[in-house]
Image: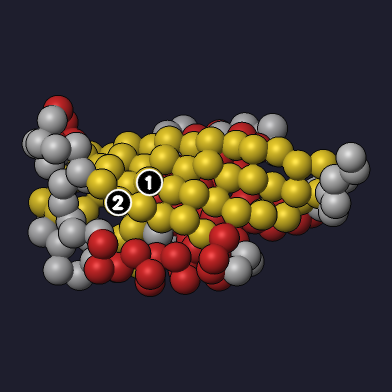
Amino acid sequence: MSLPFRDLRIGQGLDIHPLAKGRRCVLGGVEFPEASHGPAGHSDGDVLLHAVMDALLGACGKADIGHLFPSSGADSARWKNADSRGMLAQVVTMLHSDDWSVWNVDCTLLAEIPRIAPRIDHMKESLSALLKVPVERVGIKATTAERLGCIGREEGILATCVALIVKT
Ligand SMILES: [Zn+2]
C-alpha cells in the first residue's frame, strides 16, 4: 500500500511550569485575564505552546526548544518574556522550509487552576492559526490531577502534545 505522503513522523512534547501568583496567564496563545496565577518562566511561560513546539521539533528530529530559545547563557536575553506564539511561528516556518506540514496535534493540559474548559475552543482556534491546520485537526483536553502531588497543590501546570507531520 502506498501512502499519500512521501514521509510522515510523529512527535511528542511535554512541559511543566510553576504557577506564580499575579503572573500573567497565557495558554495556547490565549489570555486568561481572570486567573489569579500564571505559568512562570523565562518567556511568557505558555506551557501548552512549549509542549507543541517540542512535539514538532521531536517529530522532525531537531533539537528541543531549550536549544532553539535558550533561557540561560549569552543568547537568552532575546527570549526574556518572549511571546511563545512568535517562537512557535518560527518552528512552523522551519518545518515548512524542510517541506514538512503539520497534519494534526493532540494536547492535554493538567492543572487545578485556572479553569480551562471555557476557553478550549478559543485555544483550538489560536493553535489552528499558528500551525496553519484546520481547527478540526487540533485536539486540546484539560484535566486535573485530582488534588494529587504538585499539580494538585496548584503549584504548577503541565502540558503534553502529540503531533503528526507529513511530507507531501
Ligand atoms: Zn516551557
The answer to which quarter of the image holds residue 149 is top left
Across and down, in percent, residue 14 comes to 43, 36
In this rendered view, identify the residue nearer to me: 99 or 135. 135
Is residue 96 in view?
yes
User: Which residue is drawn at the image coordinates 44% and 65% (left, top)?
Assistant: 124
Q: Residue furthest front?
A: 1
Q: Residues within 10 Å of mark 1 (few under 14, many from 20)?
A: some
Count the marks. Answer: 2
Is residue 45 in view?
no
Across and down, in percent, residue 152 comes to 13, 36
Q: Given the image, on which type of amino acid does mark 1 rest?
A: Thr
- Say if 104 sits above or below 15 in the image: below
Disc with the residue nearer the chain's start (1 vs 2): 1
Relative placement, left or right, of 158 versus 145 is: right
Relative placement, left or right, of 134 versus 43 is: right
User: Which residue is drawn at the image coordinates 46% and 33% (left, top)?
Assistant: 73
* Residue at disc 2, CB closer than 8 Å to ligand 1: no
Does the CB distance between marks 1 and 2 fall below 8 Å? yes
Give the residue pinned by disc 1.
108
Q: Quadrant of the N terminus?
A: top right
Across and down, in percent, residue 74 comes to 50, 36
Q: Secondary structure at mark 2?
A: strand
Res 142 label:
2
User: Which residue is drawn at the image coordinates 60% and 69% (left, top)?
Assistant: 134
Q: Residues within 10 Å of mark 2 (few under 14, many from 20)?
A: some
In this rendered view, identify the residue nearer to me: 47 or 83. 47
